[in-house]
Image: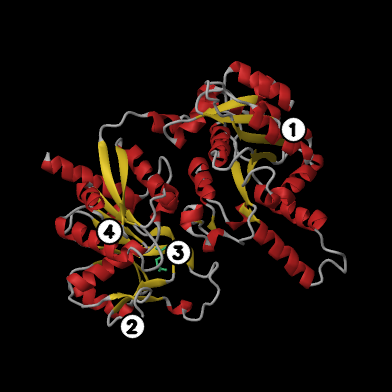
Amino acid sequence: MPTAPTGYDPTLGEKFIFVTGGVMSGLGKGITAASTGRLLANAGFDVTAVKIDPYLNVDAGTMNPFQHGEVYVLKDGAEVDLDLGNYERFLDIDMTSDHNVTTGKTYQHVIEKERAGDYLGNTVQIIPHVTDDIKRRIREAAAGHDVCIVEVGGTVGDIEGMPFLEALRQFVHEQDDDDFLLTHVTLVPYSKNGEQKTKPTQHSVKELRSIGLQPDVLVGRCEDHLDPETKEKIALFCDVPTDAVFSNPDVEDVYHVPLTVEEEGLDEYVMGRLGLADRVIPKAERDNRWRDLVTQETRGEVEVALVGKYALEDAYLSIHEALKHAGLERGVEVDVQWVDAEEMSPDHERRLRGADAVIVPGGFGVRGTDGKLEAIRYAREEGVPFLGLCLGFQLAVVEFARNVSGLTGANSSEFAEGTPHPVIDLLPEQYHVEDMGGTMRLGAYETTVEPGTLAAELYGGNCVERHRHRYEVNPEYIDRLESDGLVFSGRVNNRMETLELPEHPYFLGTQFHPEFRSRPGRASPPFLGLLDAVLDRAEVTA
Ligand code: GLN
């Protein structure tokens, strides 16, 4: 068993790892940062994270998933960037709104204070008022944790990021040398003749230095490992020791990144620099569960059709991850096939019918609902394992109302205000909501699960899951739908949270989003159930 002390040591105080990105966005800076955190957690430290998003939006709630990827929901109902999902999954922690710092949030707070007269007549400025607020937020989120990873979104040099980098510059002076480390993640491309090029890295470090920041660690994203000469060149031009330059090569799955950066000793270097070396759990005694889980052999493949609006994987990232977790737990590979709900071409129709299971994810707006309804009908009638999430749950109610209960024209009032049968209707507390940001039914609530149902079998009792919706099952239709065979197995008072069809091999809908609580090693029950249903079926038909 690990013998080294774990958890927060107040005599040491919090240590900070800032992570910036250079050259271009989308390099996987968040995954690099989260992987570093995973390794420190394996070594016995209590790690948390802060994601800085330098956009003017107060939060990600109003953002289009096609531009930004999915909106991730935290337990306190904060609607945040999908990177926070990566931190929750890699570190196995629950974060809160305070762990996502945006320009919008910071400015809103500073301006509100100014209006309240809190600045006592002073001119309110980016330096020091905004930068002070940024530093305060970071310190508060880190309090009580050994290590706080602070990822600055965007790329060094962006105008939006400047106040945050200036706050970092001040931070460096306010902390002891071994309490703070700056990791810069950049791109090392290959030239046509197969040479690893360091010039983009040199330029982005120059940019950092021009604002007074010197990186301590450089991580080069490259197709392959960095050559020793490449590392030496980066070290020379960027003023860091050669052993502070690390490779982060392409890997088949993001969950392998902690393993590849560990091979080069990134974790040991970081712990050494932060003065943590004497508190570290010896390598041989560290928690290896992550490695064991992600490197196991798989015994087959399951194909899942995801019937959605967006081809972009990031738009449904947590669903992809939850399926991966379930696959890891059952030792199978999960191949997700995107089926375009808006234009069900013969090719997409084939994908739907060729899959072992069907998922209809969450969503907003009428586009694609006909395709989703068709997919639900197919899964219900053909006995194909089905999971409907949020909008997918609501559309399963609509489909059942129309095709089983015979309620012609049944719909959600989100899509057809004048529908004769609004089986899905606006939540009463939403009637007078005008603001679009942060006003849905958001965050974690407990659902009472009816014993003896599929939901009870999956969860083993009541469950707490995260929500993000404005509409719900119209209570006036519950008796009618239930008398026709639909079972609402999970509820909060007269709010329907889960549905199922007892005669079907696996037909589950959830008003909540179970994908947000799924973790490697702790897969979400509805996703595990879906895979089990597929595997049971395969055994029966084999
Ligand atoms: N549009 C639906 C609602 O607001 C479903 C939301 C979702 O899928 N997250 O209730």
Q: Would you name the residue on which mark 3 appears?
A: 468
* Colouring chosen for the image of the structure: secondary structure
Q: Would you name the residue on which mark 4 appears?
A: 508
Indicate the position of residue 389 as horizontal and vertical percent values: 35, 59
Q: Would you name the residue on which mark 1 appears?
A: 178
Indicate the position of residue 150 as horizontal and vertical percent values: 64, 44
Specify whether 99 is left or right of 275. left
Query: What residue type is disc 2 on?
Result: Gly
In this rendering, is residue 286 above or below 175? above
> Which mark sits nearer the N-terminus, 2 or 1?
1
Secondary structure of the residue carrying numbered label 1 = helix
> Which mark sits nearer the N-terminus, 4 or 2?
2
Secondary structure of the residue carrying numbered label 4 = strand
Indicate the position of residue 311 as horizontal and vertical percent values: 38, 51
| Callout 1 touching callout 4 (CB < 8 Å) | no
> Which mark sits nearer the N-terminus, 1 or 3?
1
**Mark 3 beta carbon near ligand 1 (under 8 Å):** yes
Nearest the viewer among 366 and 516 is 366
Q: Residue at x 44, y 62 (%)?
A: 467
Total labels drawn: 4
Q: Residues within 10 Å of mark 2 (few under 14, many from 20)?
A: few
| Mark 4 or mark 2, whichever is nearer to me | 2
The answer to whether residue 339 of the structure is visible from this angle is: yes
Q: Quadrant of residue 402?
A: bottom left
